Amino acid sequence: MVATVANADTKNAIPVKVGAYEYGVVYFFENDKPSGFTPELIADLNAIQSKYFFELVETSSRRRYNDLAMGGFDLILMESPDWDWRDQDVLFSDPIVVEYDLFIARKEDVPGPGWFDDITRHELLCVLGFHYKFASFNANPEYLQDHFGVLFHYDEQQLFDHLLDGEGDVGIVSAGFLARAYAKNPELSQRVFIGPSPDFSYELVAVISKQSAISLAEFNDLIRIVKREGNIAQEWRDMHGNLPTG
């Protein structure tokens, strides 16, 4: 599915397909419409130039590698190189923003911050296809189940809902996701305990195919322009503004 997310004169523009899957505030659906940082960044990129027209292509966390390799899109936004990309024949853009993944638990279950000292002794809830530092970024489901007894869910919302309903001990979600959840329901902060240290803090980049319609250098130039105008930093801050410290 290809979704156009910005108005532009595309008659003579070179199309650049941008992969996205549901993750944190990077890409999600609001009232059944594509939303999040990736659609906003695509709109920003289209607004500052007319040579290229960026358009969003939906993929999934597990399918994204093959989709990029097979030419389903030119690049995928908001990835960490540590997420199984280093062995792929791809290029990495300059860093765009920084995100971090949080350990969360039901507040009623946590006697104090020390409860998170060794999260592997707890029953963990993870998202299928996501990568976690505690597991050395190995996203293989069988490995995670055999070594850590992980319970899997399709996305962060499903994980979060099941954790609050009493499943498992510790969930791992992105800071952006949790900020969005609190924005919709501030009372959730009374039910959730955030671990004192994140699982991982990481720079998010674009992963670009070597057959991409836009070169790495040109893409980095466009990102620098959007950064210089202040859009990227402000949009990212706004999407994390409801995250409490604990």
Image (tube, helix red, strand yellow):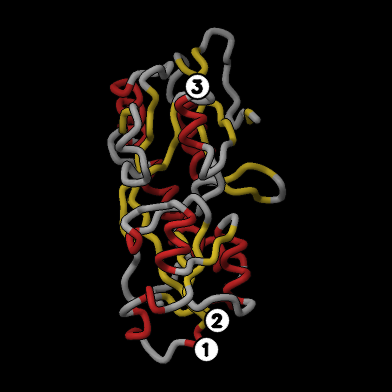
Above or below, comparing residue 165 to residue 205 in the picture? below
Q: Which residue is the site of mark 1?
A: 108
Q: Nearer the viewer, mark 2 or mark 1?
A: 1
Q: Nearer the viewer, residue 97 or 79?
A: 79
Identify the amino acid type marked 2: Arg
Quadrant, the N terminus: top right
Q: Nearer the viewer, residue 175 or 198?
A: 198
Q: Nearer the viewer, mark 3 or mark 2?
A: 3
Q: Which residue is the site of mark 3?
A: 71
Of pointers 2 and 1, the one earlier in the residue sequence: 1
Q: Where is residue 63 shown, x and y percent of the image?
A: 53, 38
Q: Nearer the viewer, residue 41 or 79?
A: 79
Of pointers 3 and 2, the one earlier in the residue sequence: 3
* Residues under numbered marks 2 and 1 in contact, where contact means CB atoms less than 8 Å apart: yes
* Residues under numbered marks 1 and 3 in contact, where contact means CB atoms less than 8 Å apart: no
Q: Where is residue 157 shown, x and y percent of the image?
A: 60, 61
Above or below, comparing residue 10 to residue 54 in the picture? above
Identify the amino acid type marked 1: Glu
Give me the C-alpha separation between circle 2 and circle 1: 7 Å
The residue furthest bottom is 111
* Residues under numbered marks 3 and 2 in contact, where contact means CB atoms less than 8 Å apart: no
